[in-house]
Image (cartoon, rainbow, N blue to C red):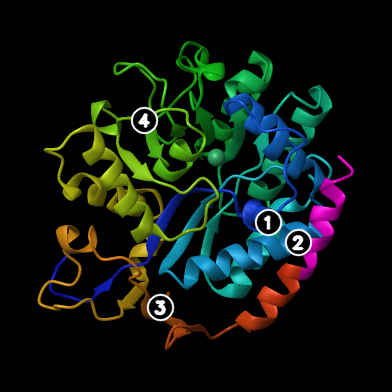
Amino acid sequence: MDPTDPTTPGLVCAHHHLYSALARGMPAPPRTPAGFTDILELVWWRLDRALDLETIRWSAMLGALEALERGCTAIIDHHESPEAIEGSLDVIAEACATVGIRVSCSYGITDRHGPDGARRGLAENERFLRSGGRGMVGVHAAFTCTDDSLEAAAGLAADLGVGVHVHVAEGKADIAAADRLRPLTTDDWLLIHGVHLDDDHGLAGCVVHNPRSNMNNSVGYARPTRFANPVALGTDGIGADMLDEFRLAYVRQREDDVTASPEDAWGWLAAGWDLFPEAQRDRVVWNPVAPVETPMDPWRLAFTTGVAPRTVEVDGDVVLADGRATRVDSDEIRARAAEQAVRLHRRLEEI
Ligand SMILES: [Zn+2]
């Protein structure tokens, strides 16, 4: 990429949870979570049970709009909604298409709602992919799945010619993931987090680093430079401002190693284009970053906050002009999302 050119291809978020956009402002959990497993049980596993297709739709619309407004044109999404599994991936794909961005969908299967839940999750992946949807086979994490479910997901992915999108060793609760997944992984898998993987873990696939989420969940630093695998950047559901995530990835690395350069984090951001090559056909014209001789230089961007796009083209269509979405009414999406958030938060108080 030419650092003197204020345009880039569309940015890629290599791990997102579009269903979490309405979680902001949700009621506080019944007690303060004391660790990563508590955070899952008291926050995210209550939220996903409260979702229905309508809240999924407006959460995805809002998430897609926010991605577009930050120059992210391709999202690799990981979804779970145990009370609304069937058709959920279509709802997310339609929402992104309506806003005008690209998405790769997967349903994160899990046995934590019993074997029938895992079976239905796998069926949703298969239904969506066989109907021509762009996506991967999703798995929540090894520690919430039986070996049978992990093997079934890997088998389905191989049959359909796609990879598996799975959280790996995010917290200590999933420390056994490497041994259980090692016989199954292939280069097209996405290994999300990898915080507690050994340096020589022996898993094939791309590690996706989510620095803000890891810090927020206090799970530790993944130290991605230690892996032989390719590394890409995701947000784990906290928006899709990829320049912001790049900045955070750099400064988190720098905190660990004062000799670190933002070129590493920039490389992780650029690795998104290997995962979602179509985004290279998209064009983002960024607002001026003063001084403008080298606006898209990693060293400059690492210290320039709030960089936003002026124009975004996806596959030749202008989907953002003068900073505003062209295909949808952004005020209307925010208003409808706010209404659905009220409904979702009310439902959460009953769970
Ligand atoms: Zn995640």
Residue 184 at x, y percent in the picture: 49, 20
Q: Residues within 10 Å of mark 2 (few under 14, many from 20)?
A: many
Quarter assignment of residue 215: top left
Task: Quote the CA–CA distance across marks 1 and 3.
Answer: 29 Å
Indicate which disc, 2 or 1, sits on the residue closer to the N terminus: 1
Which residue in the structure is indicated by mark 3? 312
Residue type, mark 1 in image: Gly
Which residue in the structure is indicated by mark 4? 221
Q: Is residue 81 visible?
A: no
Which residue in the structure is indicated by mark 2? 341
Residue type, mark 4 in image: Tyr
Indicate which disc, 4 or 1, sits on the residue closer to the N terminus: 1
Which residue in the structure is indicated by mark 1? 25
Name the secondary structure under disc 3.
Answer: strand
Q: Is residue 147 left or right of residue 190?
A: right
Q: Nearer the viewer, mark 4 or mark 1?
A: 1
The magenta stretch spans residue 4 = no
* Residue 224 sits above or below residue 59 on the image: above
Residue type, mark 3 in image: Val
Q: Is residue 258 visible?
A: yes
Magenta segment boundaries in residue numbering: 339-351
Residue type, mark 2 in image: Ala
